[in-house]
Image: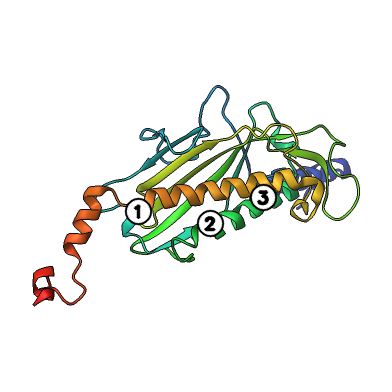
Amino acid sequence: MSIRQPESKRFSGACLVAVLVAFSYACSRPPEAANAGVRQMPAGKEFSGFLSDYSKLKPNPEFENTVAFVRDDPAKNIHKYVAIIVEPVAVYVATNADPKTLSERGRAALAEYFQVAITNAVQDEWPVVKESGPLVLRLRSALIGVDVGPAGTGQQAGEGALDRTINIGKVGVEMELVDSETGEQIAAAVDRQNLGEGATIGSATFSREEKYRAAVEAIDGWAKRLEDFLESAQELKEEERARADKSYRPYGPGDTLASQSK
């Protein structure tokens, strides 16, 4: 014989089941971040922590406000590689900025423009590819110290309008070239250029708007410095050049200058 439950108990039981189901569903869903692509500079730290290794960085006399490293291991150095992968650019807001205030559209516009600029810069040295493999480098880069203005400081109307300005006047760049298969660091640099006021972005279409020309020129300038750094790193040292000249055999493995003169 079944015992009939009072209506109030059956109703409360159904509600409990519904609450448990809803809670379980909420816990199983991935959290929705305000801007999952944004990271933050750690307080009191000189570097962001983005690079795989900072221990070998030293002041570079050829570039102001830059510390760098270039591996000189004869078996695995920058001269050995034949292609490069350009990873998406990471963005770190300043320590005193709230990552949630940097809109996803603004972050994406900044990161994507910089990625195009550095891709153009490196493809003169190596063909850009998508897949890792032997003798393929991977370029990892981050814009660090991005600041965000108060609400209402961005472009208020038009295509790509942002609610808050993005200030890159004190932004630095951290980049490294690693072996695409092993992850070994082959070269790295941290470039800090204080651009001053005026290098701001108020629209996701900033690259097409004259009012943000200072920001465009700043990003293009970083890409040019990367190109110059790579050209400098590619230059053979005297002992490397002598070794290369000694091993040069344009007419075959047994060829020597003496044999050519006969």
Residue 54, position as x, y percentages in the image:
41, 35
At horizontal 44% and vertical 63% (from top left) the residue drawn is 126
The correct choice, above or below, for 114 with respect to 81 in the image is: above
User: Mark 1 and mark 3 in contact (Cβ < 8 Å)?
Assistant: no
Closer to the eye: label 3 or 1 = 1
From the image, tell me which residue sits under label 3. 29
Circle 2 sits in a helix, a strand or a loop, which is it?
A: helix
The correct choice, above or below, for 152 with respect to 254 in the image is: above
Q: Residues within 10 Å of mark 3 (few under 14, many from 20)?
A: few
From the image, tell me which residue sits under label 1. 78
The correct choice, above or below, for 207 with respect to 98 in the image is: below
At horizontal 59% and vertical 35% (from top left) the residue drawn is 193
What amino acid type should be assigned to the residue bearing mark 2? Answer: Ala
**Residue 70 image label:** none
Depth check, front residue: 199 or 137: 199
What amino acid type should be assigned to the residue bearing mark 1? Answer: Ile
Depth check, front residue: 236 or 100: 236
User: Mark 3 and mark 2 in contact (Cβ < 8 Å)?
Assistant: no
Circle 3 sits in a helix, a strand or a loop, which is it?
A: loop
Quadrant housing the C terminus: bottom left
What amino acid type should be assigned to the residue bearing mark 3? Answer: Arg
Q: Residues within 10 Å of mark 2 (few under 14, many from 20)?
A: many
Q: Residues within 10 Å of mark 1 (few under 14, many from 20)?
A: many
Q: Report, in whole angstroms, how far the alpha carbon at label 1 lies from the one at label 2.
A: 16 Å
Q: In the rendered image, which quarter is residue 205 located in?
A: bottom right
Circle 1 sits in a helix, a strand or a loop, which is it?
A: helix
